[in-house]
Image (cartoon, helix red, strand yellow):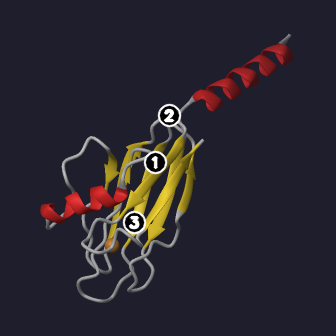
Amino acid sequence: MKFKFFIFLNILFFIVACSAPQDVKLTLTSVGDTMKYNQEILQVKGGSNVTLTFINKAKMAGMNHNVIILKPKTNLKKFASEALAHGPNYVPPSDRIIAQTKMTNPGETVSITFVMPKEKGYYPYVCTFPGHASSMQGVIRVN
Ligand SMILES: [Cu+2]
């Protein structure tokens, strides 16, 4: 009898563990003094609590970077061009933004926490510092 109860508790714990939102830690860096992220594809389970740490590894003055995570199918070219008018952070007001870091200076590290939407898809992320968006981008695959 006790053993059955033990099994029951285990199954219950398993169900709770599977349905609870996952905590995910992601780290993204820039690459040297280039306008690139070190990873262009990240993978996250929908609904996860994501802590994203971004490390700006540049040494060159003026190599400022941010990470803006956007809804699937956002037109990055258009978004980046709208950003140009919103310095010094270069983040335009938009309902397409899911999460964003501040604009970092060379050598700076920032962390943000957000909930990834449950909808499956490819969520682009981009740096909106002027001139960076075309090469400094990637996608978070939500499955
Ligand atoms: Cu950048």
Q: Residue furthest top?
A: 1
Left or right side of 14 for 50: left
Closer-to-camera residue (74/40): 74
Q: What type is the residue that disc 2 sits on? A: Lys
Q: Earlier in the sequence, mark 3 or mark 2?
A: 3
* Whole-percent x, y for residue 59 in the image: 33, 88
Closer-to-camera residue (7/76): 76
* Whole-percent x, y for residue 112 in the image: 35, 54
Callout in the foreground (2, 1): 2
Closer-to-camera residue (53/35): 35
Residue 54 tag number: 3
* Whole-percent x, y for residue 52 in the image: 43, 56
Disc 1: which residue: 50
Q: Whole-Å distance between the Cαs marked 3 and 2? A: 23 Å
* Residue pictured at 44% horizontal, 54% vertical: 124
Image height of 95 relative to 55, above or below: above
Left or right side of 38 for 75: left
* Residue pictured at 35% horizontal, 68% vertical: 133
Left or right side of 89 for 29: right
